[in-house]
Amino acid sequence: MMKQDWWKKKVAYQIYPKSFQDSNGDGIGDLPGIISRLDYLKELGIDIIWISPIYQSPMVDQGYDISDYQSIDPCFGDMEDMRHLVDEVKKRDMYLLMDLVVNHCSDQHPWFQEAIRDPFGKYGNYFYIEKKSDKIPNNWRSQFGGSVWEPLPGHKDLYYLHTFAKEQPDLNWENPDLREEIYRMVNWWLDFGIDGFRIDAIMNIKKNIAWDNYPADRPDGLVSVSKMLKETTGIGEFLGELKGRCFEPHNALTVGEVFDPTGERTEEFIGEEGYFSTMFFFDPIVPFLHDGLETRLQTFDVKIWRDIIFRKQKQGFFANVIENHDQPRGASLLIPEGDYSFYSVSALGSINLLLRGLPFLYQGQEIGMTNTVFSSLDDFDDTAVGDQYKEAIDFGYTPEEAFAFVSRYGRDNARTPVQWTDGEQAGFTTGIPWQKVNPNYKEINVEAQEKEYGSILNFYRRLIAFRKSEQYGDLFAYGDMNAKYESEDTIFAFERSYNDQRILFLCNYSADKKKLELEEQGNVIFVNYPQTTFEGNAICLKPYEVVVLDLS
Ligand code: ISL
Ligand code: CA
């Protein structure tokens, strides 16, 4: 029987703070803005809020480059606002997770500034600083393009390592002093009153410090640093220590950003004795992104997507996502073009919420926000887009194709302001938003959906209430999951069972009608269409229809 941790019955929501709600007209979302929307989130049924980084930062990578871990960036507010936020969240019986970014910091962090001043002193050893040699710089390509090695300012013969942007120097986890510093900081925040962390890019902390080259994978002669990360072992020592020193004593809820397509690490990472409470289940969105460019432009295939999900459902209790701040909008990635509608969006939401695992919504998902439109490369703000474009060109795409590619997959798609109203700047700010509002805000916005009984927003409220209901809450949280009707290519169906309770989730994930002979009959307990049609032992499913039957 699965362990019944408190958080397994909850629903989580990711806030990307710069784009959530501005309160002072500077065009940047902030903590008072978040506080003003807590009632909205509570009413939606959200229990756990994860906020992407709000620490002091030069914002080269939108806050994932931290220059002071123990202060709030002025664009978001100050420590008093943070205190207020924590209190207001608790008051509503909700929980708060911060983003723990400890693979790297900012080049503006005093540690790095000190390392520049004295590369061989205490702080030099907080980073990976190496002498130029026949090995250094090696041929690893950073996640955002170019060499992972950058000359240390003012030192001709020294290089430092960065697996992301050059303004994000990697922290040297091999150094026990650095680890102590991190643990102190993590415990400080947990003592402050937050409930846990989403843990950023954590697979990057263990490097092959022999600095070996790997075969090049692009015309630039470099190889993605993820190749090295995949082949390097020993990360468990760091993660076990982090858990023991920080997470365990505070009983913190931790969600790892772990990429593990083979599933080999599930037990070690999130089993009974795992390093984290849970980790994101990225496979359903990332294979479309990380399997090489050819597969990225393939049209969406429900069977491939469904089978990827089913393969891992049994292995662990993952954090289920259809989108986040690094990926396209789920409604644009996982719904074929032209099929976007209330029905398809509600079907996708139902799958996200009713599978086994801890569901995370990403801000705006609950109103069906979509990818935005870009007119030129200048429209992008994200530091990652330059290399995404270059990779597409290297691959042989024309400039037009490469632009279409980054427009579809660019991270800025998810970073447009939340569409609250159909008024000026979608009600996000009274000023000029740091990112352009998606032009579809007149049709897609919270205010309009509040008023409309049959809106996506009201569907999500009903869906979350169903997932957490007195009657079915335990079943969805702790129940088993078994795939059903797998030979039907467009049917996404599974059974959930707990003690003597059993339900069947049925979804016709397609724009065509589908008649399905049922092995068993049951009572209809949840739908996304006003009417359900049976014919003898068969159910006649309309496009993107969801029906949940109680079989017990
Ligand atoms: O963004 C990606 C693909 O579009 C990923 O490869 C991403 O770089 C990876 O998931 C790590 O992401 C995390 O750390 C990055 C930060 O830019 C991302 O926003 C964050 O989610 C560096 O801190
Ligand atoms: Ca603001």
Image (tube, rainbow, N blue to C red):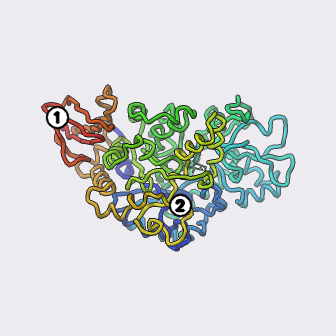
Helix, strand or loop under label 2: loop
Residue drawn at x 32%, y 25% as measured from the top left: 487
Q: Nearer the viewer, mark 2 or mark 1?
A: 2
The residue type indicated by label 1 comes to Gln
Picture quarter with the N terminus? top left
Q: Is residue 230 visible?
A: yes
Q: Is residue 312 visible?
A: no
Picture quarter with the C terminus? top left
- Which numbered disc covers residue 25? none
Q: Which residue is mark 2?
A: 436
Q: Is residue 331 above or below residue 54?
A: above
Q: Is residue 304 above or below residue 431?
A: above
Residue drawn at x 52%, y 36% as measured from the top left: 297
Left or right, 354 with reference to 294: left
Q: Position of residue 474 (x, y in %)?
A: 29, 46
Residue drawn at x 65%, y 40% as measured from the top left: 206
Q: Nearer the viewer, residue 158 or 143?
A: 143
Left or right, 209 with reference to 231: right
Quarter-of-image position of residue 446: bottom left
Residue found at the far right of this picture? 156
Q: Nearer the viewer, residue 481 or 372?
A: 372
Q: Position of residue 142 (x, y in %)?
A: 68, 42
Residue drawn at x 52%, y 55% as measured from the top left: 415
Query: Badge 2, how many Cα within 10 Å: few under 14, some, many 20+?
Result: some
For the image, the number of numbered tags is 2
Q: Position of residue 498 (x, y in %)?
A: 27, 39
Q: Which residue is mark 1?
A: 521
Residue found at the far top of this picture? 487
Left or right, 24 with reference to 479: right
Query: Badge 1, how many Cα within 10 Å: few under 14, some, many 20+?
Result: some
